[in-house]
Amino acid sequence: MQAEIAVLRFGLGAKPGDLAAASAEPRAWLLSQIKGPVPLAVNSPLAPSDQIFAGLIQARDERQRMKQASATESPDAKVAFNAIREAYQPHYRAQVLARAQSAALTTRPFAERLVHFWSNHFAVSADKGVVYGLAGSLENEAIRPHVAGRFVDLLTAVEQHPAMIAFLDNQYSVGADSTAARFASRFASRSNSEDTGKPKRQFGINENLAREILELHTLGVSGGYNQADVTSFAQIITGWSIGGGKGRLAGGVPGRFYFRDNLHEPGPKVFLGKTYTEQGQRQGEAVLADLARRPETANFIATKLVRHFIADDPPPAAVDRVARAFLKSGGDLPQVYAALIESPESWDVNARKFKTPEDFVFSTLRALNVSPAQPEEVIRSFDLLGQRQYTPGSPAGWPDTSKSWDGSDALMHRVLWASRVGAKYESGVEPADLAAASLGGYARPETLSALRRAASSGQAVALLLMSPEFQRR
Amino acid sequence: MPRPSPTNSSRRRFLIGAGALAATATIPNALFAYTGGSSRLVVVILRGALDGLAAVPPYGDPDYASLHRELAIAAPGGPDGALALNNTFGLHPSLSFLHERFVAGELVVFDAVASPYRDRSHFDGQNVLENGLAKPIGTADGWLNRALAALPRGGRAGDRAVAISQNVPLILRGEAAVISKSPQATPDVDEDLLARLADLYSKDDWFSARLSDAVQTEKMADGAADVGGMSKQSAGAGAAYPNRVAAVARMASELMRSDGGPEIAVIEASGWDTHANQGGAKGILATRLAGLDQGLKSLADGLGPLWPQTAVLVVTEFGRTAAVNGTRGTDHGTGGCAFLLGGAVRGGQVIADWPSLRRTALLDNRDLKPTLDLRSVFKAVLDEHMHVDANTLAKRVFPDSSGARPLQGLIRA
């Protein structure tokens, strides 16, 4: 059953031929996939994030003009909101389609699953307006190049990606003693602030990104930091922003990471008991480098990997092994993945994970040997199944345990989706052969018998997809 | 004073309530049992940490305006002013339905309230809110599920609680059977396919139980749609924000009104994590609050004849910083607000042991200091409204909560 485990649990489900390809050397089949960057498996002309962001800025400028041209505000705000949606929507749709096609077609499904894992670890949510068209960019631009590299490079690329900066509001986080804040307070003391009737903008930090880097990306919530560390780290990364903007905020390439020195809180800072004396952008990078080396980070990442690949309750021995590999290698991710593959717990035939909707859709595409042609197919599927792509809603990402996905209503939605997929099934491949190619030794006799007795080949496909063994990986 | 035994406690309360009608009446057992099962409870979880100082502006606190600055809500009376509750507190102007219910004596507002959690992680905060412990880990089930097992049976059978979502949130997970139902319809699933799946799942209890629940819930929803005159397909999951709360609220009320429908429902609403450009009387948070207000109104309207026996608890994982941050928003804080609403609620009161917003009174020099444990509210509602006995509440539902004594008098006798 080792080939089945390699292909179903570590990969994205079996395409015809996958089980045979992995059967000689399942471990080697996995290890061969985690070398070098992991580009999309399809040639998809996706726009880079700076270009997408420029489109957003254009839509916003349009909104400003409309506001000025009209005295009434609310209908225009709606129009402007729609303008932003329209600027972003084609990109979101293209990214979601490319992601599903890549999952359906890739010959490196283990590497592709790791892309999805890290994309969820470093989650941004496209239901925040400014992120909508950029969520896929983060995955493609910051994660794919570094999935089989060093953790510190992955971490730095993600935290400096405009999607993450904007999702966690860091672009305008301002040091109280920064050049910009000091200028503003001198200006305020000279002018009469009652002129405008509005309270003056108070310059200060926003601790959102700093807190989530510590809690969700590196140390974990019990990783030994306190509120003072969060505040200090937020000050350290003041100025980590996005290029573009106007007036005194002009600078940098629009839509690319840009360090705004005038917003940065100057001077050395103490974080987790260590004093950082670096200047500017390098201070935050030094902290990330240290965070990436800490045992708490190794343990947190190992726990999440083992939970994702082995069991909802991660076996401690496997976590230890993976965490040690992380520390020993300095966060060299291929060595971390190798430790996971070498853990005996990974090969327990009874340790099966209940599929998320994403797992279910991607493994179905592979089992049926099809790739979606239109974004609507993918978007509708995930809407129905309750996992709209790139919208986990919170920076913690989608949950990774069965309890979060196993509601009775969710099961009914899966049945509905499976029956629709079955109704469209046109291939001449016998369902029993589909079962053999997609489940191998996991196919139970009662499932095979139900497939033979099915009223139609479409119903047989629905039964196969909804069988307990297909619903688990 | 020793606690009365569970049975006596329930009976005593009932006798007090009945006493007003017929002081010397003999109570038949059947009537007693029925009363135990007639209460309805809806818990609304606001995920992301609602800013209590915006939802319940303490306009009478001298430090409020200077700390909350452009996010502060003005005193009642002026344009965009708060809706007055008393001389200190108001409601955000978006919460007009809640205010109407306050005036009608159907809303209790809690302020300076928090779960026992004192750090500032959303995810751990939500775990504590839902698991009923004093710490984020330690149990995989939720307090409402543990309470379910202890409800007086009231002659009812079957699943008594529903999560209005595809999946069940932590607060309702556990040993007692619960169902889930999202507003997104699942029309026309072929009956023959369902029968064959039931057969296919016969050796797998885990799948078998879920499929059987799903089929039952579909039937209930079909019946509810007929009774309520609502289309099952009325509410898309992709609806624009303000309607989304209303959509889940409608689904909850339809199910609760259906024959043999659940007594308890859990609704979730997200989008409260306002770190940037939160807005004041208008803006992002104001829009969200208006959506919540409309949702609660839909719930009340939908429950109709059940409203007099309903209590709705609205809670969030923690409050937000007293001062505005550098991006016209607020960061994660501690003390916040909560609401208890419904025809069964003895409303018209603000319950707040107000610590003030003086710099020296703030927790860690930044947050509203909590002076009331949310578990005191939960326990009171489960005790007075759902008739869960005090001993079970203290030992099983909220272990380690002896410091959080249940409040009294939240529910009409």
Image (spheres, helix red, strand yellow):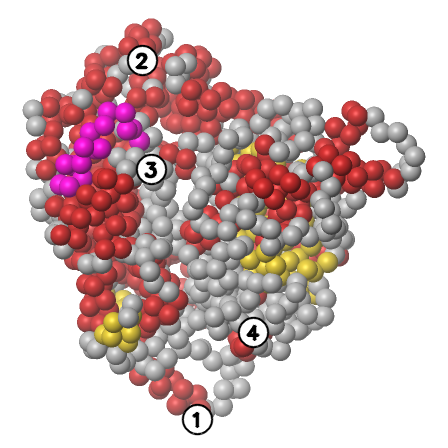
Q: Nearer the viewer, mark 4 or mark 1?
A: 4
Residue A447's tag is 2
Crowd band around label 4 with a 10 angstrom C-alpha radius: few (<14), some (14–19), many (20+): some
- Judging depth in this view, the residue of A379 and B277 nearest the camera is B277
* Residue at (58, 42) in percent of width and height: B395
Whether residue B292 is in magenta: the answer is no
Q: Above or below — where is A453 with respect to A250?
A: above
* Residue at (36, 42) in percent of width and height: A399
Query: Dot 4 corresponds to which residue?
Result: B361
Q: Which type of secondary structure does the marked residue at label 2 adopt?
A: helix
The residues tagged by marks 2 and 4 sit, at their Cα atoms, a distance apart of 65 Å
Q: Which type of secondary structure does the marked residue at label 4 adopt?
A: helix
Crowd band around label 1 with a 10 angstrom C-alpha radius: few (<14), some (14–19), many (20+): few
Residue B245, horizontal then vertical, whole percent: 54, 46
Query: Dot 3 corresponds to which residue?
Result: A313
Q: Above or below — where is A448 with respect to A442?
A: above
Q: Amino acid at mark 4?
A: Ala
**Upstream in the sequence, badge 1 or badge 2?**
1
Q: Magenta segment range?
A: A338-353
Residue A83, horizontal then vertical, whole percent: 38, 56
Q: For the C terminus of chain B, give its image quadrant.
A: top right
Query: Dot 1 corresponds to which residue?
Result: A190
